[in-house]
Image: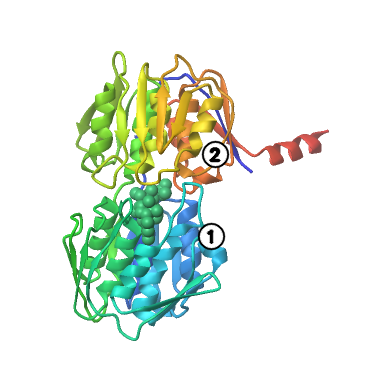
Amino acid sequence: MDRIVIHGGKPLKGEVRVSGSKNATLPIMVSALLAETPSIIKNVPKLRDIDTMAHLLRYVGAEVEQKGDTLIIDPRGFERWKAPYDMVRKMRASIYVLGPMIARLHRAQVAMPGGCVIGHRPIDIHLRGIQALGAKVSMEYGDVVATAQELKGAEVSLEGPYGSSVGATCNMMMAAALAKGTTVLRSAACEPEVVDLANFLNAMNARITGAGTPTITIEGVDSLQGTSYNVIPDRIEAGTFLTAVAITRGDAIVRGCRAEHLEAVITKLREIGVSLEILDDGIRVFVQGELRPVSIRTMPYPGFPTDMQAQFTALLSLVKGESIVKETVFPERFMHCAELRRMQADISVSAGSAIIRGVEKLRGAYVMASDLRASASLVVAGLAAEGKTEILRVYHIDRGYERIEEKLQQLGADIYRYDPAKMHKKNSASK
Ligand code: EPZ
């Protein structure tokens, strides 16, 4: 299994380009199943989660062809209404197939995703939504089974215990696009990835208005046609690079990102004392002088993203004074803190908050990646730590960051990847 090794302490300099958004591409790929003809999706990042989704789409009968950063999805063979546990357990976003299955095949059997390392992740809002459109839902051997001869538009609230749900909003837009009549989604998620999905669906002739606001209206249509579409840039990858440059006190340009998708992140970085210049095609980030501790509260968009919490926790561990990070979206999402402590960060976690007392130095260590953003935070910390950091289980990072070590090398980082098993074989062979 690959590991990433970083010799920290070098200020990052130069330019890096962000890839297309993982969390926008995943629902867009699935919604290509709603059409009667093929779609071409461009600016798709090369990631494990995208491969997993392509595998699932092929399993249900679609043809998926990948050429560089372009995917061609032909939905004409889509006829299988089952998504087995073996596929769903690898990636929770597999639950997105529920919407297109019930809308086009009138039946769906999707394994219930289990818990995951960032906490309890139920799907009750998704199910409440499709039931409101007229589907009958039951549970069989751990699978969600849904049937509906015809979906009918309805008014549905997507409010959950921690705000709205991105996944349920996407699933409902897909299901309602082909329902009879009008659907109104209240307390809908406002994330840019939701807007991107709505734009893609509209390009396929859906009739969706209000995406990006808490009320989305969908006028059902009889059929959708494939289209050609460019996915938005990944705001979380961009935010991760901004944090990485800031923690190393570097000076670099993150190209291809959209500042308007990063407002909460930019505001917090400025509050910390990081300098940012918004350019036509990106953001310049640099540090002059002392950084200051802050309080952060994660919230649904346009609030501070939970997917940036771990990277900011790493950054704040080197900022003098006491910072507080409250996680309100996934209150148990603090697995990275124990690993950051191995690097001599001073962090305590209680009741959904991390209290971070800035230290003078982080020191390199062996650390274990537990999930995607937790592993990103270990990379961010490793870039600034004294000495060598070796990150195990980096397959987590490959789920969401395209060629992260190459991109960071472009910024001058001393980072590489290796597989100890292969090194061992090579050494044994040369004996
Ligand atoms: C999406 O997950 C993202 N994943 C996550 O990114 C991101 O952290 C999350 O939104 C929040 O922004 C993808 O887009 C593939 P939610 P999703 O439904 O849709 C609760 C990453 O690192 N909830 O918006 O699964 C839920 O438990 C990943 O890239 C219910 O209670 O998240 C959470 O507390 C990790 N019932 C809150 O809502 C439901 O039916 C928000 O979850 C659904 C969700």
Q: Is residue 424 above or below residue 301?
A: above
Q: Residue at x 42, y 54 (%)?
A: 68
Q: In the image as oriented, which residue stretches furthest toward the right?
A: 431
Asked if residue 15 shows in the view, the reply is: no
Estimate the x, y position of residue 188 in percent, counting from the top left: 24, 58
* Residue 274: quadrant of the picture: top left
The kind of residue tagged 1 is: Arg
Asked if residue 218 shows in the view, the reply is: yes
Quarter of the image with the C terminus in it: top right
Question: How many numbered marks appear?
Answer: 2
Estimate the x, y position of residue 34 in percent, counting from the top left: 33, 74
Tell me the residue that label 1 is attached to: 89
Q: Which mark is residue 309?
A: none
The kind of residue tagged 2 is: Ala
**Residue 332 left/right relative to 152:** right
Label 2 sits on a secondary structure element that is loop
CA neighbours of label 2 inside 10 A, class few (<14), some (14 to 19), many (20+): many
Quarter of the image with the N terminus in it: top right
**Residue 352 left/right relative to 222:** right
**Residue 162 left/right relative to 91:** left
Tell me the residue that label 2 is attached to: 369
Q: Nearer the viewer, residue 215 or 278?
A: 215
* Residue 216: quadrant of the picture: bottom left
Label 1 sits on a secondary structure element that is loop
Q: Residue at x 33, y 74 (%)?
A: 131
Estimate the x, y position of residue 295 in percent, counting from the top left: 30, 29
